[in-house]
Amino acid sequence: MTEAHYEQFVALYKKYHEQGFEILAFPSNEFGGQEPKSNEEIQKFVADRGVTFPVFAKTTVNGKHAHPVFNFLRAKLTGLLGAYIKWNFTKFLCDRDGIPVKRYSPQSKPNECEADIVELLGKKATKEFTPAATPATSAAPTDAEAASSSAP
């Protein structure tokens, strides 16, 4: 599943990024220990597959220590197991305002999302977005930086 997903994500990103499409990837090791690599190893793995979209440090997506992004996404769109994310490669599609509009199962291939992506790209944002801060890089923090971070 990993190879096919990354291949399709890379193709979609290349095809639609200039129109405003963004992919944010958050590796997680909470599903059967499937992501045991360090953040540096993950960055090398995705770079070797042509990934140019942001891949963040490993994070927690469920439970009391879940990253705030996933608390928001899960609250807005539930899945087969309610708000719980059941496996890696669960995908959320958000509109230009950052509002989640569709959730896809881990088994859904990225290409299965393409029609929905195209539809959303055809719509304008309803709010003007002003980022609080623009990151200098989209690279994930090193393991040392992640370990010293106060984020959950």
Image (cartoon, rainbow, N blue to C red):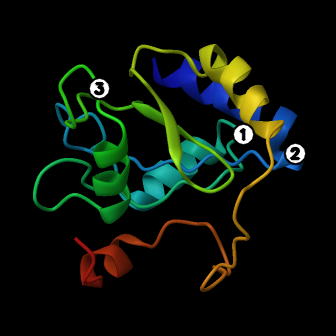
Dividing the image into 4 quarters, which one contains the C terminus?
Answer: bottom left
Mark positioned earlier in the residue sequence (3 or 1):
1
Q: Does 94 sit above or below residue 125? A: above
Dividing the image into 4 quarters, which one contains the N terminus?
Answer: top left
Residue at the extreme front: 126
Q: Amino acid at mark 2?
A: Gln
Question: Do residues under tags 3 and 2 come within 8 Å of each other at their CB atoms?
Answer: no
- Residue at which label 2 appears: 19
Q: Give the Cα separation between the discs numbered 1 and 2.
A: 20 Å
Viewer-proximal residue among 138 and 34? 138
Residue pictured at 63% horizontal, 56% vertical: 97
Question: Do residues under tags 3 and 1 come within 8 Å of each other at their CB atoms?
Answer: no
- Residue at which label 1 appears: 50
Q: Amino acid at mark 3?
A: Gly
- Residue at which label 3 appears: 79
Q: Give the Cα separation between the discs numbered 3 and 1.
A: 30 Å
Residue pictured at 39% horizontal, 22% vertical: 106
Question: Do residues under tags 1 and 2 come within 8 Å of each other at their CB atoms?
Answer: no
Callout 2: 10 Å neighbours few (<14), some, many (20+)?
few
